[in-house]
Amino acid sequence: MTRPIWIKNIHQLATLASNKEGPRSREAMSKLGIIENGSLWIEDGIIQAVGSTIVLEQQYAARREEAEIVDATGHLVTPGLIDPHTHIAFGGSREQEFEMRLEGVPYMDIMNAGGGIHATTRMTRECTEEEIISQTTRRLDSFIHHGVTTVEGKSGYGMNLESELKQLRVMKKLQEIHVIDLVPTFMGAHAVPPEYKGREEEYIDHLINDMLPVVAEEKLAEFNDVFCEKDVFTPEQSERILEAGKRYGLIPKIHADEIVAYGGAELAAKVGAISAEHLLKASDEGIKEMAKAGTIACLLPATALYLREEAANGRKMIDEGVAVAISTDCNPGSSPTTSMPLVMNLACISMRMTPAEALTAATYNAACAINRQDRIGSLEVGKQADVVLWDVKSYQELQYLFGVNHTKAVWKKGVKVVG
Ligand SMILES: N=CN[C@@H](CCC(=O)O)C(=O)O
Ligand SMILES: [Zn+2]
């Protein structure tokens, strides 16, 4: 039996609790369920009680000696942050491309010349499972130190049956050995591999007929993602791939309208995608359709910054009724960061979201984007005790003091893993 944990005297406890289920948009994104001088009682990895310290002192009067007490005077406590979009399991790195881009070479030109996603695919194919596990573990360690307790991860640097399965199996193993919960997405449609150049439809047939059945059979993924972009997959091809995934129980996600407006947001609404990603160039019509369909916008302001592009219009999306989540997009090319706190800062600075909206986007709405809102994303009785204690007094201060990692302690399923 492990000792209960009682985190008390919390200056500001942002529970993110609400009596309304489902992704939040408009003013619901600003409601953080704040408790001043709050308390959390954690036992068996689960939150047993949430409330003011005065109330929990009475409730647990008979058991206070039993508990390990954490005095959070002067501190903010939030749910563990959730990163709903990463490409975390890969081999190698691409710092020379970073220099090329700084000299002005566009991201897609590098990719079309065989670099970018193709370069990482070559390096990932060459790695053993053990090598990818070791490189990915370093990134997961960095995530947890930034207060992130759950991470979605995509395949897509294999682009053949063997290597796609290798990436997904690596994530399955990491799920067993690392404290972070990893949520796997199949993204065989990250690009058309060079060996299929000019035979795009054949690659799609291969993906649908040979890859999807094995991914589903081995239960290696929950979602199916496509890079719907000019010179990658057209909306029609993307729809075919996502509809095929649905037949295997994989929920659609789409990398949409990142570089050019391409109808990705509209397609996300049409196929019932749980989320559409990037959306820098999403059309007004596409945003409206996403709001109507309940598709979450998963916005990646660190990627926009890194590519020196104008960020997606998060403000407009929230005002139009789209639920917004945010993510690092952690990948070796367009956003090699593991800092969700920085992403929250950028959501405020580059997407004109409020500090409260940024926190909702990195917790509850991020949980919704990976279909986990029943167990994570808010601090409520019965939910997993994924908790972060921050070295600031409020969520406002967390977003204001930007570019700094204020994580002081992290509990994953009630076990202290940082601090
Ligand atoms: N845009 C497509 N895929 C990734 C980048 C992958 C890479 O450059 O390796 C993204 O979401 O940003
Ligand atoms: Zn991505």
Image: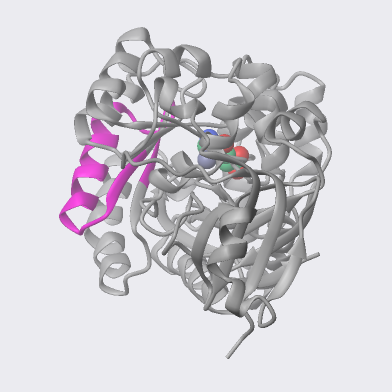
| Residue 326 can be seen in this image | no
Residue range corresponding to the magenta coloring: 225-253
Q: Position of residue 73 (x, y in %)?
A: 79, 51
Q: Residue at x 80, y 41 (%)?
A: 392
Name the colour scheme.
one colour
Q: Quadrant of the N terminus?
A: bottom right
Q: Position of residue 290 (x, y in %)?
A: 30, 23
Q: Quadrant of residue 140?
A: bottom right
Residue most extreme to the top: 284
Q: Nearer the viewer, residue 349 or 247?
A: 349
Q: Quadrant of residue 351?
A: top right
Q: Give the side of residue 99 with respect to residue 15, left or right.
A: right
Whether the magenta-drawn stretch holds residue 268 is answered as no
Q: Position of residue 182 (x, y in %)?
A: 51, 63
Q: Quadrant of the C terminus?
A: bottom right
Whether the magenta-drawn stretch holds residue 235 is answered as yes
- 110 up-or-down from 390: above or below: above
Q: Residue at x 60, y 79 (%)?
A: 63
Q: Residue at x 22, y 59 (%)?
A: 209
Q: Position of residue 44 (x, y in %)?
A: 52, 78
Q: Quadrant of residue 269?
A: top left
Residue most extreme to the left: 247
| Residue 314 can be seen in this image | yes
